[in-house]
Image: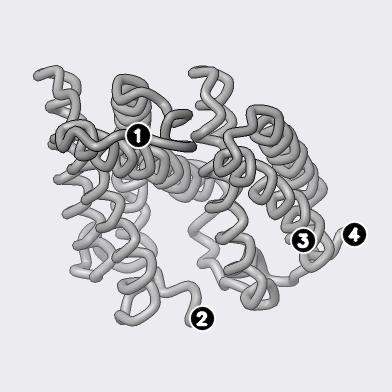
Amino acid sequence: MISPEFSTAVTLLLYGSASVAGLAGVAARSALWRKIGCSVALAGFACQTLMLFLGFHKALPGGLSAGAYFQLMAWFVVLCGIAAWAKLRQEIPLVFATPLGLMLFAMSAPYLASVVQVPPSLNTSFYALHIGSLFLSLALLALAFAAGALFLFMEGRIKSKLTMKGFWLDMPALSMLDKINAITTMIGFPMYTLGIVSGLIWAKPVFGGTVTGDPKEVISIVIWLFYSVLFHNRLTKGWKGRKPAQLAVFVFILCLFSIIVVNTFMETHHAFIRR
């Protein structure tokens, strides 16, 4: 049986090497090092996927650890970066996604032995539907955030007639950043909706009510409302450029507030880290 510590160490090594090579390639404007970084990231993703299939988490009695949830989130983030690399022929999304995956893995280390006790009513299908769809939507939102923030920065420099020098010349065009934002929104919002709806359905037998007033439920619904505005205007009004970039950044910041502040410092059913 592969231990969580061994799995984490190997994947950390690969994601760390990929992050260094990819970011060095960006800083030095070296296409070769960016490609090496992407290739090593792909190897790290394959390694993590293999570890998941081998079931390293089964070494822990009682279910997944809190650290495993961080690692699953990292898996989805890198998966989205790889998909963007393959679909758009752009290395930058994966170059930026890999360090985020690395950070999530580093955050997971202290919680590898902290088992999250899951109610029996939350079965495998629940995790595939609720946790999987939410994690995928959050990973897509992370890419939308990166694309949106980069779009706003570069557009600001262009409007101010400031010259773009060095590695900024290798960044994707504004139209490509807007396209990344659009694609991640079109896929991410339905996934987020699926995750929220499935969670509300399962909340009644588990917590005694569909909506219990839990802080996590409240902030999740608020996020869904803002996310729906972004999705609706993208879909029906052809929103492009600055406004959707700003809203994507704002929605992701709300998600970070939900994950870091609500899960850690508030009394909530979803405070897994404190369990």
As drawn, 192 above or below 187: below
Mark closest to the chain's N terminus, 3 or 4:
4
Query: Which numbered disc, 3 or 1, marks the residue closer to the eye?
Result: 1
Front tag of 2 and 1: 1
Look at the numbered discs 3 and 1 and tell me whether their residues touch, using CB distance below 8 Å: no
Mark 2 and mark 1 residues within 8 Å of each other at the beta carbon? no
The residues bearing labels 2 and 1 have C-alpha atoms spaced at a distance of 48 Å
Q: Is residue 44 left or right of residue 23?
A: right
User: Which image quadrant for residue 173?
Assistant: top left
Q: Badge 4, how many Cα within 10 Å: few under 14, some, many 20+?
A: few
N-term-proximal mark, 2 vs 1: 1
Query: The disc labelled 2 sits on which kind of residue?
Result: Arg
- Determine the secondary structure under disc 4: loop
- Label for residue 58? 3
Q: Amino acid at mark 1?
A: Met
Q: Which residue is tagged 4?
A: 1
From this view, report whether residue 222 is shown above or below residue 118.
above
Q: Are marks 3 and 4 in contact (CB under 8 Å)?
A: yes
Where is residue 61 shown, x and y percent of the image? Answer: 74, 71
Residue 160 image position (x, y, % from top left): 16, 37
What is the distance, in whole Å, between disc 3 and disc 4 at their CAs?
8 Å
Near mark 3 (Cα within 10 A), the count class, few <14, some 14-19 or many ≥20, is some
Please, what is the three-letter code of the amino acid marked with disc 4? Met
The label number, if any, that marks residue 164 in the structure image = 1
The secondary structure type at the circle numbered 2 is: loop
Which of pointers 2 and 3 lies earlier in the amino acid sequence? 3
188 to 178, vertically: above or below? below
In depth, the one of 12 and 217 nearer the eye is: 12
Compare marks 4 and 1 and give the one earlier in the sequence. Answer: 4
